[in-house]
Image (spheres, helix red, strand yellow):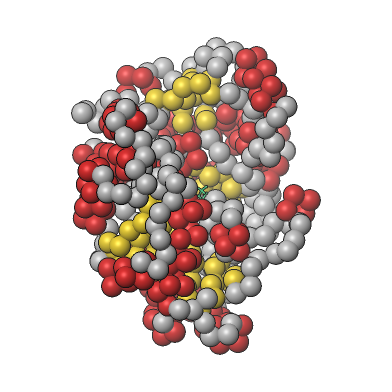
Amino acid sequence: MSKDWWVESAAGIPKLITETPGPKSRIMHANTTRYMKGLSSQVKLFPVCFEEGYGITLTDVDGNKYLDFSSGIYVTSLGHCHPKVSEAVSHWAGKLMNAHDFTTPVKEKLMEKMASILPGKLNAIQLYSDGTASVEAAIRAARAITNKHEFISAYRDFHGKTMAAVSCAQMYRGETYSYGPSRAPGFYMVPRPDPYRPLWTKPDGSIDTDAYIKFYDTFILEGTVGNVAAFVLEPAQGWGGSIFPPEDFFPKLKKLCEKYKILIYDDEVLAGMGRTGEWLTLNHWEVIPDIVTFGKSFGNGFPVTAMVVAEENGSALEKISASSSYGGNPMACAAALASIEVIEEEDILENVHTVGKFFMKRMQKMKEEHPIVGDVKGKGFLLGIELVKDKKTKEPFDEAGNLVYQKAFRKGLAWIPAGHILRMSPPLIMNEKYASMGMNIIEEAITEVEKEFGYK
Ligand SMILES: Cc1ncc(COP(=O)(O)O)c(C=O)c1O
């Protein structure tokens, strides 16, 4: 299949034929929210109702066509309804939907394919059906491998919404999430290095990763009972705002973990499978994790996730059964296998490297030219623009973030930033033409917001 399968469908986007959200969107959203509760801030701020997605285009129920800059939510990374993935799923939907955790021909192929693309000896695999379930499995695996029970995770990382996953992440304050009890016993959090907002700096003002590692070392000795099974970390913070650690952070953390025989659990649910130009984002720093999880784009929209450990720890997985109602069903295996094959056949990693550089150059220019753009960050197609009230004080500018979000959406950009960091996760098939189109829309929206708030 040609790499350009989506190009014709994108001609002429964005194409807006009503005000947005349009009249049908508003009615359908109102009908739905009579019953459906707890929607995200993005939906509340822009209540559009989508009907179709193909490649890099989303179409709403009023017939408006948008340029997609979010891939669902980091999910449809190879484009909406990639024909190869859709065909693979529908083949098994007509042949065999579920077979417990028995082997199927498509599972056999997926296992072999995964073992061939993953670094080191990461080849002991379990399959699940959402990211959080794979995170829970990773926690169980870490316990089973080490016979230890404590976990250290990092401020502003996100790992899902069940008890262990929530215990590894920020407990929100304020009205929405202030109910207790808080994290489960044995789960601790530490700060991780954010180059734009460093907690510890060297005399020259640059971030001091040694100080972070020294703090972790002290924390392990003083703040735990000496039974830490794993450090639980996103390779780059996705939900937290596309924040990447300094280049030397993970290699140093690996050494510390070796000293205390602590595993590195790398949660690649959001950042893995090509989003930053590598199968694993951790590959950028040449660190091989002990445990890794994949989700979101793993099946390009079909719910399928994976938890993987190194071969030498595979026997420990026998202690934690992989069987679940949906994990590894034939449709799920077909979606994941087809998605990996597409990444290979369409040279997706190469595209992410090339167009990723274009994105970064463009964002750097925005940082130079716009008073409210405090920082720009990212690798490949995992990108962020951080808005601040003042470049010196770096005070987060949430109101501007929300306005830029709405304005850009009204101009035809479907995306999902939250608060002051404009997160972007465009489909990995996108070329420079549409990357530039999306950036132009965002820049226009930023310029308008700056004027409204009296800048320039
Ligand atoms: C890094 C990371 N881990 C786990 C999860 C949970 O995945 P899911 O929403 O599929 O349960 C998410 C979801 O955003 C995530 O970003």
Residue 422 coordinates in the image, percent (x, y): 56, 44
Quadrant of the frame with the C terminus: top right
The residue lying at 40 percent from left, 48 percent from top is: 327
Q: Nearer the viewer, residue 270 or 338?
A: 338
Residue 207 coordinates in the image, percent (x, y): 52, 70
Count of labels in the image? 0
446 lies above or below 266: above
The image quarter in which residue 215 lies: bottom right
The residue lying at 41 percent from left, 17 percent from top is: 12
The residue lying at 42 percent from left, 37 percent from top is: 301
Residue 349 coordinates in the image, percent (x, y): 28, 46
Is 175 situated left or right of 384 in this image?
right
Q: Residue furthest right?
A: 175
The image quarter in which residue 447 lies: top right
Quadrant of the frame with the N terminus: top left
Q: Nearer the viewer, residue 368 or 76?
A: 76
The residue lying at 64 percent from left, 20 percent from top is: 28
Is 257 situated left or right of 277 in this image?
right
Residue 438 coordinates in the image, percent (x, y): 47, 32
Q: Residue furthest bottom?
A: 221
Q: Is residue 61 visible?
A: yes
Q: Is residue 450 visible?
A: no
147 lies above or below 293: below
Is 419 situated left or right of 298 in this image?
right
